Image (cartoon, rainbow, N blue to C red):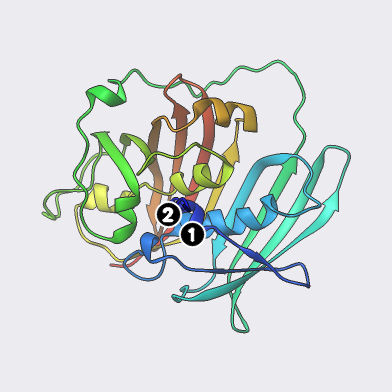
Amino acid sequence: MSVRAHAFDAAIALQPQPDGSWRGRTSPAYANMIGPYGGITAAQCLQSVLRHADRLGDPIAFTVNFAAAIADGEFLLRPRAVRTNRSTQHWMVEMLQGDHVVATATAVTATRRDTWSGHEAGMPPVPRAEDTPRTLRRGVEWLNRYEMRFLEGAIPKEWDGQTRDDSLSRLWVRDDPPRPLDFASLTAIADVFFPRVWLRRARPTPVGTVSMTVYYHADAGLLAATGPGHLLLQAQGQGFGGGYFDHGGQLWSEAGDLLATTHQVVYYKE
């Protein structure tokens, strides 16, 4: 009797090609308003590096740039290591549909060493995940892939155009159904934040992520120890204007370990 794959694992499944590239398909389970959820595209790009036979170490930094709208269907990923040093390795990835590049990515993988550590981004005091009511799912399909429990800064219930003083969000998140955490799923979760301009202005403004970066502060062992537990996510916008805004975010385990920090720049239209 076969065991059905988790929707996330099915979405990031890639088939190796003779020339070293990888072929995959977009997943209806992670559909967004137009094309796929950006977090799943990021995870697919990273997965092409994670599965590469020449990879050195684990990711410490990853950036994906969304160059064009991604159509439903097949895509090709071309990862290549552009430089390998003693403890770091630098990667470039192209995602293509037909002859067109629809996304590019860079990754840095590295072997970590035992050193002094001390994070300044401390986990804020918040109620536990099990003491926080689950936020009802609504809207696009990819939202059904995550269990979200908002503490503050949820999507506006009314688009009343009232400007808020800030765009801070805090919420507990995990895959639905729960799935052990790894670098690919952590990358996808780093994109669950709603557009900060929606929170500031309470208007359904057209938006699109231009570039997304994740810095990994956890190694594979810490991610394995985190398992299928909830993550506390926090994000806040920083600058808005000229049709673009950015936000910075942090992701912690239930134990208070800083797993990753993230940054995005997003296009918006009046």
Q: Nearer the viewer, residue 160 or 190?
A: 190
User: In this picture, is 225 found above or below 178?
Assistant: above
Q: Which residue is mark 1?
A: 11
Query: Element type at marker 2?
Result: helix
The reply to whether residue 210 is visible in this rendering is yes
Q: Which residue position is annotated with label 2?
A: 7
Q: Is residue 136 above or below residue 83?
A: above
Left or right of 233 on screen, residue 158: left
The residue positioned 54% from the left and 53% from the top of the image is 43
Q: Nearer the viewer, residue 171 or 8?
A: 8
Assess disc 2: are there few (<14), some (14-19) or many (≥20) residues with their C-alpha within 10 Å of its C-alpha.
Answer: some
Q: Is residue 115 left or right of residue 47?
A: right
Percent across and percent down for residue 2 are 48, 53
Q: Amino acid at mark 1?
A: Ala
Rendered residue at 61%/17% (across/down): 118
In the picture, the quarter occupied by the C terminus is bottom left
Task: Indicate the secondary structure of the residue bearing disc 1.
Answer: helix
- Residue 140 screen position, x and y as percent: 27, 61
> Can see residue 167?
no
| Residue positioned most to the front | 1
On the image, which quarter does residue 175 sit in?
top left
Q: Residue at x 29, y 40 (%)?
A: 148
Q: Quadrant of residue 189?
A: top left
Residue 93 in percent (x, y) is at 68, 62
Instruction: Report the residue at 54% width, 57% height from top.
Output: 12
* Circle 2: residue type: Ala
